[in-house]
Image (cartoon, grey):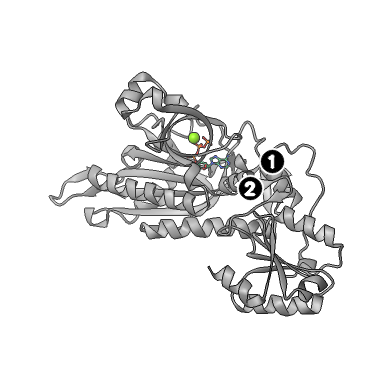
Amino acid sequence: MKQSQLFTKTKKEAPSDEVAKNAQLLIRAGFIHKEMAGVYAYMPLGLRVLENIKRIVREEMNAVGGQELMMTTLQPKEIWEKTGRWDDAKVDNWFKTKLVNGTELGVGLTHEEPIVDAVSNYLNSYKGMPFSVYQIQNKFRNEKRAKSGILRGREFLMKDMYTFCKDQEQHEQEYEKIVAAYHRVYARLGLGEITYRTYADGGIFTPRFSDEFQTLTEVGEDTIYVDEKKRIAINEEILTDENLKKLGLDRNDLVAKKGVEVGNTFHLESKYTDALDLFYIDEKGEKQSILMGCYGIGVSRLMGVVAELFSDDKGLVWPENVAPFAVHLLSLGQDEETEKICIELEKNGIEVLFDDRDAQAGAKFADSDLIGIPCRVVVSKKSLAAGGLEVKMRNESESKIMTVEELLQMLKK
Ligand code: ATP
Ligand code: MG
């Protein structure tokens, strides 16, 4: 893509009311637009990153048998009344609305009830289980504080998955399979080393713990206690002697850290299926409860975490897997030659942002650092005289002269 045609422009300053580093950088680089506190729109560069994260999440959910669907944002009140959640005082962040005739509706903040309602059209026999469904969809929550940029939005993108199993054994298998898929998602985003499976409160309807996936960062809102050797953590909220004993953890092995919750998984038992009258008939013809699990990943929050963690004083430093483009190609007064190189790279399947703008070299370099594409390629009189292209990785300081073939070889690795 030609940068002269990209309608977004970089900015020297972020809006003065924006305090979070992730949003400051993403706004300055033209990835997101702030509509209002906690509500951000994704501009072309930002959408490319978001789509890359979605692709990784989707691939890993499909790999464990997840079937993708898309539920609605508008939800009928009745199904939430059946589970007692419509008027639950603990759900204090729900946007609700009304039809013209006064009928109340919920605006999607999670989807357990609607999913069970939809599934009950189809599921009645043990033969249909286990199975899992998921969606990647905007959720709406009336968050009290929304000062962390895209880490905590009032409208944000979530992947939510739900499993349906006929017994506990089947449920455990599905659950652990999905936990393993979560670890693969975080690893592919470059967060594997610093993301911990973390024991957390399981909620009211199960004595078991839930699992949170916490990425270590100083901007995290949660305090977790990490056992580095076991690569496991426990959320401060449930840190009691009794729980430590139950989990086989030793207080002396734990180190307090700040974390941001990038996903979580819950055992729901048969709380929602029973309440919504979804049962199955077993091998003996008897009616049985269906066990559910639910599994969330904060897709847009992950983009914010990556922006926070992979950045320096000059701007963003995208990991290759999520970068909006693979190569930032800068022409310094060599537009014709550079265009040929651009075509050659694109022919080889490389995604290129081609800075063909009529601008000073210094401005092009500064923008390139701010936007943070992993590989910067400069074509100038000097580079051509030296034998080709001046190639610098965003996370390195030294550049190298390469031919187009050498660059292609390096990128294919
Ligand atoms: P939190 O504890 O951060 O408020 P939660 O426990 O309410 O989140 P879930 O309802 O389980 O989260 O949502 C699944 C995932 O969606 C979370 O693990 C998190 O990564 C992400 N998420 C939750 N709320 C937000 C939000 N307001 N903005 C962005 N991402 C969010
Ligand atoms: Mg939470």
Task: Residue at 62% x, 74% y: name it.
Answer: 406
The CB of the residue at mark 1 lies under 8 Å from ligand 1 = no
Task: Residue at 56% x, 36% y: name it.
Answer: 94
Residue 245 can be seen, yes or no? yes
Image coords of residue 98 (percent x, y): 59, 42
Q: Nearer the viewer, residue 174 or 284?
A: 174
Q: Nearer the viewer, residue 100 or 279?
A: 279
Image coords of residue 341 (percent x, y): 70, 77
Residue furthest to the front? 386
Q: Which mark is residue 21?
A: 1
Residue 380 can be seen, yes or no? no
- In this picture, is 183 found above or below 4? above
Q: Secondary structure at mark 1?
A: helix
Q: Which is nearer the N-term, disc 2 or disc 1?
A: 1
Q: Nearer the viewer, residue 404 or 206?
A: 404
User: Residue beneath label 2, please?
Assistant: 307
Amino acid type indicated by mark 1: Lys
Tally of marks = 2
Q: Give the side of residue 104 with respect to residue 21, left or right.
A: left
Q: Give the side of residue 304 with respect to residue 127, left or right.
A: right
Q: Which mark is residue 354?
A: none
Amino acid type indicated by mark 2: Ala
| Quadrant location, the N terminus | bottom right
- In this picture, is 273 found above or below 120? above
Q: Nearer the viewer, residue 384 or 280?
A: 384
